[in-house]
Amino acid sequence: MSDHSATLWLILASALTFKAMVLFSLSLKAHWKQVLSAVRNSTAGKPHSQRLKTCGWILLVLSGASCLRADHASMAVLVWILLISAAAFIVAMILAYRPSWLRLFALPIFVRR
């Protein structure tokens, strides 16, 4: 596999891992309220926790598959674990600093009316 295609697979894995960590955090009621509190007249209610977690797990598995596509198995597992750690840290820092930045990930299908 060429270096360019491996790079693209790793970029995809990074994006999928970040989105998975965001969905996992939004599945928690406290973070859901924290992210959607800035929306005026928000009728967000409770998050669809199970649906958010399921989507998060699917994205996490896809990111692992992307890592496997980019490298051999032992390196792919190492990169995948590091991506999960980095994404979780970044999401935690965003939640601490500007939780409204994660509002994009609270898709309308997850918002109860």
Image (cartoon, helix red, strand yellow):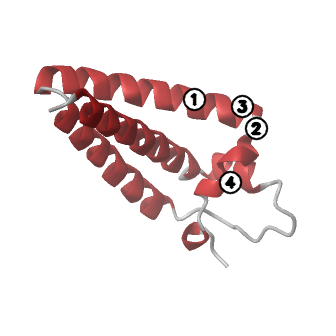
Q: Which three-letter amino acid code belongs to the residue tagged 1?
A: Ile
Front residue of 12/32: it is 12
Disc 3 versus disc 4: nearer the observer = 4
Q: CA distance from mark 2 to mark 4?
A: 10 Å
Question: Which of disc 1 and disc 3 is earlier in sequence?
Answer: 1
Q: Position of residue 52 (x, y in %)?
A: 47, 58
Would you say the residues marked 2 and 3 are in contact, meaning their CB atoms lie under 8 Å apart? no
Crowding at mark 3 (Cα within 10 Å: few <14, some 14-19, many 20+): few
* Pointer 1 residue: 90
Q: CA distance from mark 1 to mark 4?
A: 15 Å
Front residue of 56/62: it is 62
Would you say the residues marked 1 and 4 are in contact, meaning their CB atoms lie under 8 Å apart? no
* Pointer 3 residue: 96
Crowding at mark 1 (Cα within 10 Å: few <14, some 14-19, many 20+): some
Badge 4 element: helix
Q: Which three-letter amino acid code belongs to the residue tagged 4?
A: Arg
Question: Which of disc 4 and disc 2 is earlier in sequence?
Answer: 2
Would you say the residues marked 3 and 4 are in contact, meaning their CB atoms lie under 8 Å apart? no
Question: Which of disc 4 and disc 1 is earlier in sequence?
Answer: 1
Name the quadrant containing residue 92.
top right
The quarter of the picture where the C terminus appears is bottom right
Q: Please tell me which residue is depicted at 44% across the width and 64% down the height of the picture.
A: 51
Q: Which mark is residue 98?
A: 2
Would you say the residues marked 1 and 2 are in contact, meaning their CB atoms lie under 8 Å apart? no
Badge 1 element: helix
Judged left or right of residue 70, residue 91 is right
Above or below residue 49? Residue 13 is above
Q: Position of residue 25 (x, y in %)?
A: 55, 44
Q: Which mark is residue 103?
A: 4
Q: Which three-letter amino acid code belongs to the residue tagged 3?
A: Ala
Q: CA distance from mark 2 to mark 3?
A: 6 Å
